[in-house]
Amino acid sequence: MSALTLELKNFVEQEIYCCRFCHCSERKPCEIDIAVNEDGTERLARTALEVEETRPCGWYMVGVCNAPECIEKLLEEKRGKVLLFDAAGHTLRRAEGR
């Protein structure tokens, strides 16, 4: 078996993880919206107008990607209702459908 054939076989047989909340996968990741502050620091975008760039998600744990909405759903699932706050202490609303 050639090295290329072996590499393709391993690629096809590779286990594909899927996020149980947004259903993205390693081969089709969801996007995380990033905003850039005036001082150049990066943060999660809160609105569509703030989006400077988007980055593909990664894995927080098996079955859950690191998209903020999925982490929030995981927290709610594990601990019951969880409130998230921004740096100024204001309660953040869930970003459904963004």
Image: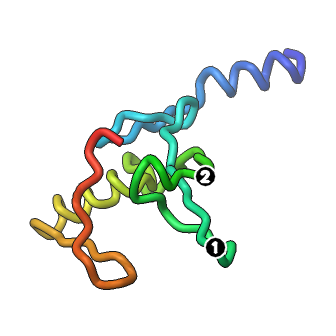
- Dividing the picture into quarters, in which one does residue 88 lie? bottom left
Which residue is painted at 51% across and 51% down in the image? 33
Q: Check disc 2 and report the residue beneath it.
A: 52
Measured from the top left, where is residue 81 in percent x and y? 11, 66
Pick the front one: 77 or 88: 88
Measured from the top left, where is residue 54 in percent x and y? 58, 46
Measured from the top left, where is residue 19 in percent x and y? 38, 41
In this rendering, position of residue 69 left or right of residue 37: left
The image shows residue 38, relative to residue 3, as above or below, that is below
Which residue is painted at 34% across and 59% down in the image? 71
Identify the mark at residue 38; answer none if there is no mark.
Answer: 1
Mark 2 closeness class: few <14, some 14–19, many ≥20 residues within 10 Å: some
Mark 1 closeness class: few <14, some 14–19, many ≥20 residues within 10 Å: few
Q: Amino acid at mark 2?
A: Glu
Which residue is painted at 18% across and 64% down in the image? 78
First in sequence, mark 1 or 2: give its number: 1
Report the number of discs: 2
Q: How is the image coloured?
A: rainbow
Secondary structure at badge 1 equals loop
Identify the mark at residue 68; answer none if there is no mark.
Answer: none
In this rendering, position of residue 52 left or right of residue 69: right
Outermost residue, left direction?
80
- Dividing the picture into quarters, in which one does residue 27 lie? top right
Foreground tag (1 vs 2): 1
Secondary structure at badge 2 equals loop
Q: CA distance from mark 1 to mark 2?
A: 12 Å
Pick the front one: 48 or 13: 48
Measured from the top left, where is residue 58 in percent x and y? 54, 51
Q: Quadrant of the N terminus?
A: top right
The image shows residue 78, relative to residue 64, as above or below, that is below
Q: Amino acid at mark 1?
A: Glu
